[in-house]
Image (cartoon, rainbow, N blue to C red):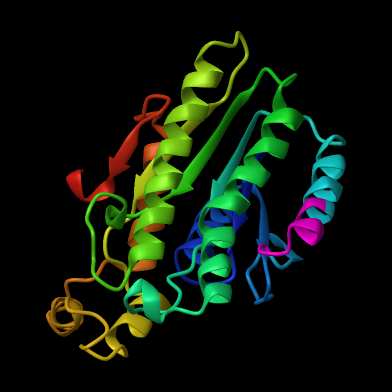
Amino acid sequence: MNIVIITGGSKGIGKALAKKYASENYKVYSLSRSIINIQDVTQIVVDLSNFKEMKNQFSMLLDQLKEHSTSSITLINNAGRLGTISNIENIDPIDISESVNLNITGPMVLSNMFINYTKNLSCKKQIINISSGAATKPYEGWSVYCASKAALDMFTKTVAAEQEMLANGIKCISLYPGVVDTSMQAQIRGTKEENFKNLQRFVDLKENNDLYSADYVAETIYNIDIQNKLENGAVFDIRTI
């Protein structure tokens, strides 16, 4: 059985990924706070910023997976949060904490548990982290988002280096999906220009139909996956394809 576990699989890129992998006969699990109607996807309600709840739910899922014969298993850390868009001094500390927890601490915790679970499996096994070009480019108003995505990329590279040294290690990669037509983009366009100097660029992308669809991104990621195009530790922008 080919298994894919996706965080934030109820909307945006995560939803598109869940639908795509399920359509290709993968056993798909979605971890998110909300449930929607997606055919052939097992949805688990969990607050990914509540680490105790996340650990308990993920542990139960991993225990269930022991009953299956596994041909491949993938964790896609997709869930993310832009948070309040403004200069850092204007953002509530709790909002900062929530963004960091969802964007980087959560993926670290899930990866820790996933690697421990898969260490004795000899099948294809990998972690795909959905990052952002914001990891390499500073946007005024996105300090928390940019920093957490940069941290996710370095986490990817470090885990890959650790696993490379093992006889039965996993592959860990990071992907930039480009600018995608999701609710996050709607949030950006609804921001006051005084809080985000790059606002007009994102308004223009929408008006000029230059945003990727979530379905296109999911299709591209799936093809990258099944064709084994990426090396362990790669940080890859799908816009370069």
Image position of 37 (left or right of 90) = right
Locate the C terminus by quadrant: top left
Residues drawn in magenta: 48-55
Image position of 63 (left or right of 97) = right
Q: Position of residue 101 (x, y in %)?
A: 59, 59
Overall secondary structure of the magenta section: helix
- Where residue 120 sits, quadrant-wise, is top right
Using the image as rendered, state which of residue 210 and residue 88 is in the foreground.
Answer: 88
Using the image as rendered, state which of residue 174 and residue 27 is in the foreground.
Answer: 174
Rendered view: 173 above or below 107: above
- Where residue 142 sits, quadrant-wise, is bottom left
Residue at image x 87%, y 41%?
A: 63
Image position of 196 (left or right of 6) = left
Rendered view: 80 above or below 73: below
Using the image as rendered, state which of residue 238 and residue 203 is in the foreground.
Answer: 203
Q: Is residue 101 magenta?
A: no
Locate the N terminus by quadrant: top right
Examine the rendering and report whether any part of residue 155 can be seen: yes
Please tell me how many numbered marks the rendered image carries: 0
Q: Position of residue 218 (x, y in %)?
A: 41, 56
Q: Position of residue 109 (x, y in %)?
A: 67, 45
Q: Position of residue 162 (x, y in %)?
A: 53, 20
Q: Check the image and name the residue furthest to the top.
A: 167
